Image (cartoon, rainbow, N blue to C red):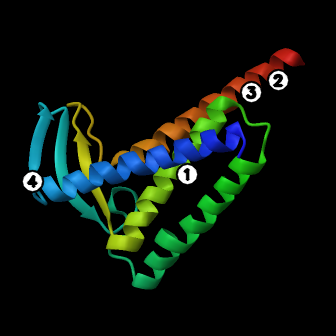
Amino acid sequence: MNKRVGFILFLVLLNIGLDQITKHIVRAEVVPGSRTEVVGELLQLMNVENSGAFLGMGSESHPTIKLIFLLILPVIVLGVVLYYLFTNTELDKFSIVGFSAVAGGGIANLYDRFMFGSVTDFLFMDFGFVQTGIFNVADLSVTTGMILLIVASYKQKKETTLDS
């Protein structure tokens, strides 16, 4: 195994591991439906099972629709992302880390859907003027990965413009 592949596997597994460890702790230690202030109202800890997609969207959908959009389609998309990540040797570090975070977070949430039929969400932030939905470490990984991919795209576009 070359260094690049090892780095990618490490990042993907790190994202999955951090997510699964935190969810295991929350399932064992946090009462479902409870709300605990960690940093005042800014950061709160909860235990909510999400049978839908982002922010619970689709949780009331027909089981066949949920199977297609919450299991089958994500498996296909993650397969394509992983294939691209492992085969495109031209990716810069930002892109490698970004795609690895997206893949790791996606796999972690898919694992929950397969094993438990839902995803455990437990973090909530209230900034006063805006609040987040309830989310987990996998969601944070996917979001961070997408931000890194946007930064990488911007950097690449800027470098291409300077080279022209």
Q: Secondary structure at mark 2?
A: helix
- Measuring from the top left, give residue 158's x and y in whole percent: 74, 21
Q: CA distance from mark 1 to mark 2?
A: 27 Å
**Position above or below: 74 against 7:** below
Label 4 with label 1: CB-CB less than 8 Å: no
Q: Tell me, for residue 103, which label it has, or none.
A: 1
Instruction: Check contact, mark 2 vs mark 3: CB within 8 A.
Output: yes
Which structural element holds mark 1?
Answer: helix
Q: Is residue 39 left or right of residue 125?
A: left
The CA span between labels 4 and 1 is: 30 Å
| Residue pictured at 22% horizontal, 52% vertical | 25
Question: Circle 3 — which element?
Answer: helix
Mark 4 vs mark 1, foreground winner is 1
Do the CB atoms of the residues marked 1 and 2 lie less than 8 Å apart?
Answer: no
Which residue type carries mark 3? Gln
Q: Which residue is mark 4?
A: 34
Residue that mark 2 sits on: 160
Q: Label 3 neighbourhood size at 10 Å, few (<14), some (14-19), many (20+)? A: few
- Front in this rendered view, residue 2 or 34: 2
Specify the amino acid type for callout 4. Answer: Ser
